[in-house]
């Protein structure tokens, strides 16, 4: 007898199973949030919550972008440059006759197109994603510097105030993005990205179009990254051709903190989101407590290694007992 | 029965890889309501033919025809649309997805572009009922044992409601009980008019299930005929052109020498508190259903997983080897079942794989001694009848020959105990015979051979003593005349002699 008795429950049961193994992460995130609230009670006001989520939002987006590719068995080193390019394009197009909507479309299209091109190269020429995206990161940085050699450009004040003002719009946007991801994962293409990451040959033989899944993964990843750039531009009120640089490694760090594996098909998006939240809280706490930058980097590195090592140590400790 | 049109045909298909012809003008026709056996030694082209029939590869020339009509460009998706499903030898599952999602993968029912989970559940429940999968459908495949994953693979093929079902070595990781369920499923499908193609190295299964056989040898068809009136020996003759009588070398009179491995209260992984011993000159078999601790027993003795014993002696020294290095020093070597991942470095040459364990010993003043290496390689290749150029990458060899390399590389260390994990899985009969002869030879030289196997006849005819594990405990220890398929299978399944399924 199956323990899933009613057909309508299967989806829910599968969703609950995906929390498996994430209990520890949820606890750690909750503990850090409690610590944060104790240290900075201001987060409990609307303004404080808004600011906090605005700091987290771009990292959450790029972590999703990175996790999406890691689940598909890839990785991207072009996150930072693509964030910068998104910011630059936002800051240079919003003055045109098409205004802000035109700028948003331009940023979204750029992200999708660059992602799709990288994906097509990786999928059809069968080149390693880490090399193609490394090359891509140089090219994208170059393009951003050509478009806007020094920080500047134009972002309307009302857009900055809407996205990065005293209202939790960024948080609401994140909720929308997560709901869209849930819907996407309930499509054959969404699950195909998972399957193609874990067992590409098996997925191909099952009738999954592995190449198409890979290109879709890169395109969506590019879209999320470029939109993160747009948000960063709104936050800072201008475009900056190198502002995205820290995001590349932070996105990988957050995904790894969230339990996403490097070999594809392993991990969950909810884990990656928690990882980005954890990283964001950690960075904030250390910043506000006045840690010198050296200590911040050191602590960040140690925590990431610990996050990967602790579950493994626990596993072998349990096995030995 | 055979008046009907074939559902799926290959007509004079040719296929080669990198200039090596693998299929040279092969014909095969799958008729509805018939179980068709495809036999051939490893490297005869069976896998390639399956890949052509299922659209995973395109023929260089010749045609694939569905319902008598040639199809142009055939892809896995097109094959599925034509009602062709394949149970692959290598699993096509995604570990982190649930059983249900794996079964539906590539053929999801949709509603508004989303996967229709309610509909998926209905369909999956039906096929899981057919194959006896009782695990919760939301369970990730990663949590299942290998044999259960194979059943998911079979359910996945059935979910596609195939008109043509191709089964490539479906029972190699199944327990006898699961294989019995599969046999029932096959008979049900046959009676419903499905065309089945069955590939197996287990001839008793072929005889029990199939009514027609195509035999491949070196990329050509050597027989395409009804199976009625052909016994097991006849089948082997069709494949290798030789009597089967000498598949297993004659058993030497059991004359065990000194104690090489003795353990009491031994626990490792699934294995809990068993007694185990082995003497020089013995071949000890470890049998049982899939995943009852056979591998853990070997790995525990080898020091590769944590193990403990109340009392133990290995190669005259008290205690278990603490790690793999200590085990090697005590004369133990281990040949894993998963030769592709654990046993060999696939892209490297046969030669470098052969000398890998000996590199340290052959070095002179810290540098490699090419002359000594060359001599060793030539000697090993000759002793193991590895044919052809040893500079070829190991992955170019057939499964059976890869296994020979995985075995051979340990011989220069002159091991006193060989731990072998299913050494003949997916190996063709000719190579099996060679491996059996080798193992007999090792025992005659005074080595202890411990062999875990899922192939019951192998345990019966090769081993001097057989330990049957069930749920990590010893269910039976048989020796001499007491070793029989019935006794092994019965003990493995936890039943008395009567009612044991072969």
Image (cartoon, helix red, strand yellow):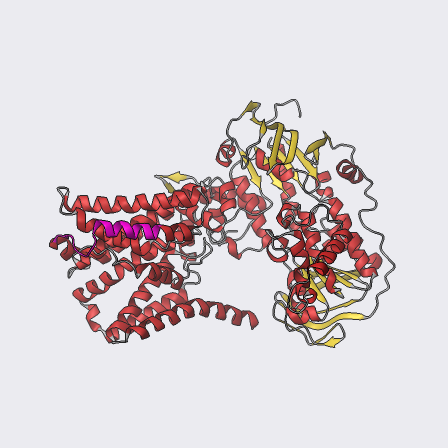
In the image, residue B27 above or below residue B268: above
* Residue ID at (45%, 56%): A266
Give the left or right position of residue A224, taking residue B253 as reference.
Answer: left
Please state which of residues B172 and B265 is positioned toward the viewer in this rendering: B172
Residue B342 visible in the picture: yes
Percent position of residue B356, x then y: 65, 60
Please state which of residues B73 and A8 is positioned toward the viewer in this rendering: B73
Give the position of the C terminus of chain A as an image quadrant.
Answer: bottom right
- What stretch of residues is rendered in magenta? A136-156
* Residue ID at (22%, 44%): A105
Looking at the image, how many numbered discs can be counted on the residues? 0
Residue B211 visible in the picture: no
Give the left or right position of residue B31, taking residue B72 as reference.
Answer: right
Percent position of residue B420, x then y: 70, 59
Please state which of residues A152 and B344 is positioned toward the viewer in this rendering: A152
In the image, residue B14 above or below residue A93: above
Q: Is residue B204 found inside the magenta-colored segment of the image?
A: no
Q: Residue furthest right?
A: B253
Q: Where on the picture, by quarter, is residue B492?
A: bottom right
Please state which of residues A254 and B460 is positioned toward the viewer in this rendering: A254
In the image, residue A197 above or below residue B6: below
Give the left or right position of residue A58, taking residue B269 as reference.
Answer: left
Percent position of residue A173, x then y: 24, 54
* Residue ID at (56%, 49%): B133
């Amino acid at each position: 007898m199956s323990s899933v008795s009613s057909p309508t429950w299967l989806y829910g049961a599968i969703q609950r199973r995906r929390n498996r193994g994430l209990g520890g992460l949820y606890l750690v995130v909750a503990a850090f949030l409690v610590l944060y609230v104790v240290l900075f009670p201001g987060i409990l006001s609307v303004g404080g919550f808004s600011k906090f989520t605005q700091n987290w939002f771009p990292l959450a987006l790029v972590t999703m972008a990175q996790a999406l590719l890691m689940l598909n068995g890839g990785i991207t080193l072009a996150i930072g440059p693509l964030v910068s390019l998104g910011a630059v394009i936002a800051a240079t197009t919003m003055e045109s006759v098409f205004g802000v909507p035109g700028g948003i479309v331009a940023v979204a299209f750029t992200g999708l197109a660059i992602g799709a091109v990288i994906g097509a190269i990786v999928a059809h020429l069968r080149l390693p994603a880490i090399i193609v995206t490394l090359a891509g990161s140089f090219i994208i940085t170059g393009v951003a510097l050509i478009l806007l050699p020094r920080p500047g450009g134009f972002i309307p004040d009302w857009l900055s105030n809407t996205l990065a003002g005293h209202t939790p719009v960024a948080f609401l946007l994140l909720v929308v993005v997560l709901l869209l991801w849930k819907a996407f994962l309930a499509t054959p293409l969404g699950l195909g990205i998972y399957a193609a990451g874990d067992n590409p040959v098996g997925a191909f033989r099952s009738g999954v179009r592995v190449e198409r899944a890979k290109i879709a993964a890169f395109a969506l990843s590019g879209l999320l990254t470029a939109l993160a750039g747009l948000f960063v531009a709104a936050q800072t009120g201008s475009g900056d051709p190198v502002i995205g640089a820290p995001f590349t490694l932070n996105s990988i760090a957050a995904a790894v903190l969230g339990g996403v594996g490097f070999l594809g098909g392993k991990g969950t998006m909810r884990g990656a989101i928690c990882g980005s939240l954890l990283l964001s809280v950690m960075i904030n706490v250390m910043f506000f407590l006045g840690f010198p930058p050296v200590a911040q980097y050191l602590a960040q590195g140690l925590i990431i290694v610990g996050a990967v090592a602790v579950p493994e140590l626990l596993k072998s400790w349990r096995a030995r007992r | 029965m055979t008046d009907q049109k074939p559902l799926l045909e290959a007509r004079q298909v040719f296929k080669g890889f990198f200039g090596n012809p693998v299929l040279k003008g092969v014909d095969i026709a799958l008729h509805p309501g018939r179980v068709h056996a495809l036999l051939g030694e490893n490297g005869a082209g069976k896998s390639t033919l399956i890949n052509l029939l299922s659209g995973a590869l395109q023929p260089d020339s010749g045609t694939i025809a569905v319902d008598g009509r040639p199809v142009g460009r055939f892809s896995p998706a097109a094959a599925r649309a034509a009602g062709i499903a394949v149970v692959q030898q290598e699993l096509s599952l995604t570990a982190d997805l649930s059983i249900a999602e794996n079964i539906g993968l590539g053929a999801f029912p949709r509603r508004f572009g989303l996967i229709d989970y309610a509909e998926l559940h209905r369909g999956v429940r039906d096929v899981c009922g057919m194959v006896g999968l009782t695990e919760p459908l939301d369970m990730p495949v990663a949590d299942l044992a290998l044999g259960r994953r194979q059943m998911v693979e079979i359910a996945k093929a059935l979910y596609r409601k195939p008109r043509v079902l191709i089964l490539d070595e479906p029972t190699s990781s199944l327990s006898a009980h699961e294989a019995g369920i599969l046999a029932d499923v096959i008979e049900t499908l046959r009676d419903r008019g499905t065309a089945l193609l069955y590939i197996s190295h287990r001839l008793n299964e072929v005889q029990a299930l199939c009514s027609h056989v195509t035999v491949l040898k070196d990329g050509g068809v050597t027989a395409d005929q009804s199976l009625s009136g052909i016994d097991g020996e006849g089948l082997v003759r069709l494949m290798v052109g030789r009597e089967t009588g000498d598949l297993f070398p004659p058993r030497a009179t059991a004359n065990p020498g000194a104690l090489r491995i003795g353990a009491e209260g031994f626990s490792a992984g699934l294995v809990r508190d068993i007694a185990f011993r082995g003497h020089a000159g013995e071949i000890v078999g470890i049998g049982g259903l899939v995943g009852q601790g056979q591998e853990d027993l070997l790995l525990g003795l080898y020091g590769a997983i944590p193990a403990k014993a109340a009392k133990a002696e290995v190669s005259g020294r008290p205690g278990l080897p603490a790690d793999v290095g200590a085990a090697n020093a005590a004369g133990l070597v281990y040949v894993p079942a998963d030769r592709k991942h654990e046993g060999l470095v696939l892209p490297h040459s046969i030669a470098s794989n052969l000398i890998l364990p000996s590199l340290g010993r052959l070095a002179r003043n810290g540098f490699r001694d090419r002359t000594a290496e060359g001599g060793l390689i030539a000697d090993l290749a000759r002793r193991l009848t590895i044919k052809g150029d040893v500079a070829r990458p190991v992955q170019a060899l057939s499964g059976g020959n890869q296994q020979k390399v995985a075995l051979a590389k340990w011989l220069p260390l002159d091991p006193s105990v060989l731990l072998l994990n299913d050494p003949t899985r997916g190996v063709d009969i000719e190579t099996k015979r060679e491996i059996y002869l080798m193992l007999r030879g090792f025992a005659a030289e005074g080595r202890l051979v411990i062999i875990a196997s899922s192939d019951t006849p192998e345990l019966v005819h090769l081993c001097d003593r057989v330990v049957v594990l069930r749920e990590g405990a010893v269910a039976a220890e048989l020796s001499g005349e007491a070793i029989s398929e019935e006794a092994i299978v019965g003990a493995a399944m936890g039943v008395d002699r009567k009612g044991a399924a072969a």
